[in-house]
Image (cartoon, rainbow, N blue to C red):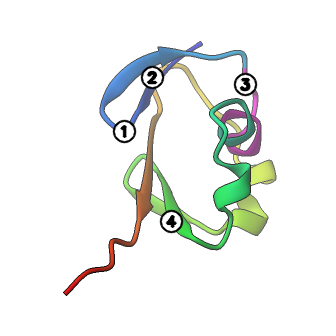
């Protein structure tokens, strides 16, 4: 299916948000970034329950530190 990941169309074989995050290599970022599905924040613990549909938008946002 085609998903929009951080604004870029990407084809993934993922059924759930957790599947997509793992395929994209974000699982190691758990607790260090926020995930939004179609502009709604999804807790990491709920990602495995979020079924994906073709055309869904996933945004992964991380904090930036600096001075």
Residue at the far bottom: name it: 67
- Provide the secondary structure element on which disc 1 rests: loop
Residue at image mark 1: 6
Tell me the distance, in whole angstroms, between the alpha carbons under discs 2 and 1: 12 Å
Residue under label 4, please give it.
Answer: 34
> x and y percent of residue 20 in the render?
67, 34
Q: Is residue 64 left or right of residue 49?
A: left
How far separated are the C-alphas under marks 4 and 3?
19 Å
How many numbered callouts? 4
Residue under the image location 34 percent in, 24 percent down? 8
Q: Residue furthest left?
A: 67
Q: Position of residue 38 (x, y in %)?
A: 42, 46
Mark 3 or mark 1, which is nearer the start of the sequence?
Answer: 1
- The residue carrying pointer 4 sits among few (fewer than 14), some (14 to 19) or many (20 or more) residues within 10 Å by Cα, namely some
Q: Residue at x 33, y 79 (%)?
A: 65
Label pair 2/1, CB-CB below 8 angstroms: no
Q: What is the number of the mark on residue 55?
A: 2
Identify the residue position indicated by label 3 in the image. 14
Q: Is residue 16 magenta?
A: yes
Mark 2, secondary structure of its residue: loop
State which region is magenta: 14-20
């Amino acid at each position: 299916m085609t998903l929009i990941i951080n604004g870029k169309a990407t084809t993934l074989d993922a059924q759930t948000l957790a599947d997509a995050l793992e395929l994209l290599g974000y699982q190691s970022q758990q607790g260090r970034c926020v995930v939004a599905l179609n502009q709604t924040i999804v807790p990491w613990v709920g990602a495995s329950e979020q079924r994906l549909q073709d055309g869904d938008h996933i945004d992964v946002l991380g904090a930036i530190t600096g001075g």
